[in-house]
Amino acid sequence: MLRRVLPQAKTLAQDIVQDGDAVVDATCGNGHDTKFLSELVGAAGKVYSFDIQAEAIENARSLCGSHGNIEFILDSHENIDRYVDSRPLKAAMFNLGYLPRGDKSITTTPASTMLAIQKLFDRLADGGRIIIVVYHGHPGGKTERDALMEQLSQWPQKEAQILKYQFINQKNDAPFLLCIEKNRHA
Ligand code: SAM
């Protein structure tokens, strides 16, 4: 069976992230990706996990329990450069949209998402990946989707390879996946 979008996002991270790596969850939400990344990088690694809602960070803290390799950051992902140390990042994950079971009016926005992607790309290790699950069924979701697609499709091929993974016959604006892989410079 073809892998669904969320498991595929995890596989794209799992393929490259190793014990001891530094990674980012750019949209912490209820913390499922943060927990997954924390287990991937192990005790010697580090997960920077961002959200603008205290409720999200609280939910994620209770999900993640005593994983000591996570730094929860109550700030927008566009300010990522204020928090990460100089270690190159191996991967970053985004789930765009609103907090599940939370306030649906608080969503990611095109300008801050793109700025965060650009800043993350600058800090990414060669071969590192930014993995983005795009939810476009909510108000504002299509604008964000279109802005991302327009800008990412112009990204120079010599810098990155960018993948789109999407089921094209699913109803109800099913989410799709984008993955930006930074080219290796010999
Ligand atoms: N991966 C999460 C999980 O496991 O539950 C779900 C993430 S949810 C779809 C999107 C989250 O992005 C929301 O919690 C929302 O508050 C957060 N968010 C929105 N704008 C943000 C921003 N500028 N910086 C960081 N987080 C943001």
Image (cartoon, rainbow, N blue to C red):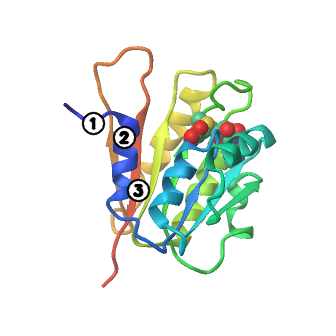
Where, quadrant-wise, is the N terminus in this rendering?
A: top left
Residue 126 vertical position relative to residue 164 in the rendered view, above or below: below
Secondary structure, mark 2, is helix
Q: Nearer the viewer, residue 87 or 143?
A: 87
- At 34% from the left and 80% from the top, the residue drawn is 185
Please say if the residues under marks 2 and 3 sit with CB atoms less than 8 Å apart. no
Callout in the foreground (3, 1):
1
Q: Which residue is mark 3?
A: 180
Q: Position of residue 181 (x, y in %)?
A: 38, 61
The circle on residue 3 is: 1
Depth check: 48 or 61 in front?
A: 61
Residue 150 locus on image (x, y percent): 47, 43
State the SS at label 1.
Answer: loop
Residue 68 visible = yes
Q: Earlier in the sequence, mark 2 or mark 3?
A: 2
Please tell me which residue is depicted at 52% across the width and 76% down the height of the picture: 88
Q: Residue at x 73, y 51 (%)?
A: 76
Q: Amino acid at mark 1?
A: Arg
Residue linked to disc 2: 7
